[in-house]
Image (cartoon, rainbow, N blue to C red):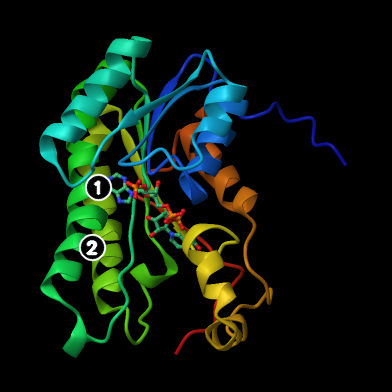
Amino acid sequence: MSTGAPPRSLQGTTAVVTGGTTGLGLGIAERFLAAGATVVCASRDTHDVRTVLDRFPERAHYHRADVSDEASVRDLMRFAHERTGRLDVVVANAGISRDAKLARLSLADWNAMVGTNLTGVFLTIRESLPYLLESGRGRIITVSSLMGSRTAVGAAGYCATKAGVEMLTRAAAIELGPKGISVNAIAPGFINTGMGKKVEADERLWQRYRDRIALGRLGDTAEVTEAAAFLAAPESSYVNGHVLEINGGLRWS
Ligand SMILES: NC(=O)c1ccc[n+]([C@@H]2O[C@H](COP(=O)([O-])OP(=O)(O)OC[C@H]3O[C@@H](n4cnc5c(N)ncnc54)[C@H](OP(=O)(O)O)[C@@H]3O)[C@@H](O)[C@H]2O)c1
C-alpha cells in the first residue's frame, strides 16, 4: 500500500561517492542518480562505472582518485565542485579487506587497510569541508561494517579500521553539526555484492555467518542504498552522529 510519501529527492544536489564504481558504492551512486542528484564516482580504476555513465550522461561523472592520497582526494573534491558548481553530499565508501590472522598479517596489508578505510575516510571528510560548508546543507555518509562493532578471527585489521570509522563519524558529527553538516555512518552486514558476495561464495564460511543472521539471508544492495538515500535526503535532517546497522539482525558472540 502506498503511503503517499514523496520520493526522497536529491534534485539539484551534487554527491561524491568514493569507491562508486562497483559493489555498494556503484549501487549508492545509481540510487542517488535516480533521485535526481549529479554524482561523481571515484576510485583508482573504472570497474563497472560505464553502466551509470551511459544511463545518466548529463549527471554521472567518473574521476580517478586514491582516497589514501591527500593530493588525490583534494583534486577529486575540486573536480566535483568545478564540474557541477557545488558539492552537497559525500559518501566515504571506498574500502578494502585483507584477511589474515595477526601473526601473519603483513605490515603492507595493515597499512593498506588503515590507509584506505580510515585515513581515506578522514581525507574524504576533510577535503570536502570547504565545499560542504558553502553548500549550507552538507551531508557526510561514511561506510562502516558489522565488523566495526563485532570481532572475527582473521579480520583484526579490518575490524580495527571500521571501529575507527564509527568513532570518527561520531566525533565529526559533533564538530560539524554546528556548522550545518551532518555526519552519519551505515554499517552493512553481508550484502549480495562486493565483499559480501565473496563471503557467500565460500560455502563453509557463509554457513557459519548465515546461522547468525536472524533473517537468514544476505542483504540486497537496494536495502543498503535506500538507507544511504535517506541519510542524504532532506527527510533525515535531524539525524546526526548515528551508525545505522543494516544486517538482518545479528546474533554474535
Ligand atoms: N559488500 C558487503 O557485504 C559489505 C559489508 C560491510 C561493509 N562493506 C563496506 O562497503 C564498502 C564497499 O564495499 P564493497 O563490498 O562494495 O567493495 P568492492 O566491491 O570491493 O568495492 C570497493 C570500491 O572501493 C574502491 N577503492 C578501494 N581502494 C580505494 C582507494 N585507495 N581509493 C579509491 N577507491 C578505492 C574500489 O575501486 P579501486 O580498487 O579501483 O580503487 C571499489 O570501487 C567498503 O567500505 C566495505 O568495507 C561492504
Q: Is residue 189 visible?
A: no
Instruction: State the residue position of label 2.
Output: 113
Does any atom of ligand 1 lie closer than 8 Å to the CB of label 1? no
Question: Real-space Cα distance between discs 2 and 1?
Answer: 11 Å
Amino acid tagged 2: Met
Which of the two discs, 2 and 1, labels the residue nearer the N terminus?
A: 2
Q: Residue at x 24, y 73 (%)?
A: 157
Q: Is residue 65 visible?
A: yes
Q: Nearer the viewer, residue 239 or 82?
A: 82
* Image quarter in which the N terminus is found: top right
Which numbered tag is attached to residue 121?
A: 1
Q: Residue at x 34, y 37 (%)?
A: 182
Q: Residue at x 54, y 37 (%)?
A: 229
Above-or-below relation of 228 to 55: below
Image location of residue 177, percent across then percent down: 27, 36
Q: Residues within 10 Å of mark 1 (few under 14, many from 20)?
A: many
Which numbered tag is attached to residue 111?
A: none
Q: Nearer the viewer, residue 11 or 76?
A: 76
* Image quarter in which the C terminus is found: bottom left
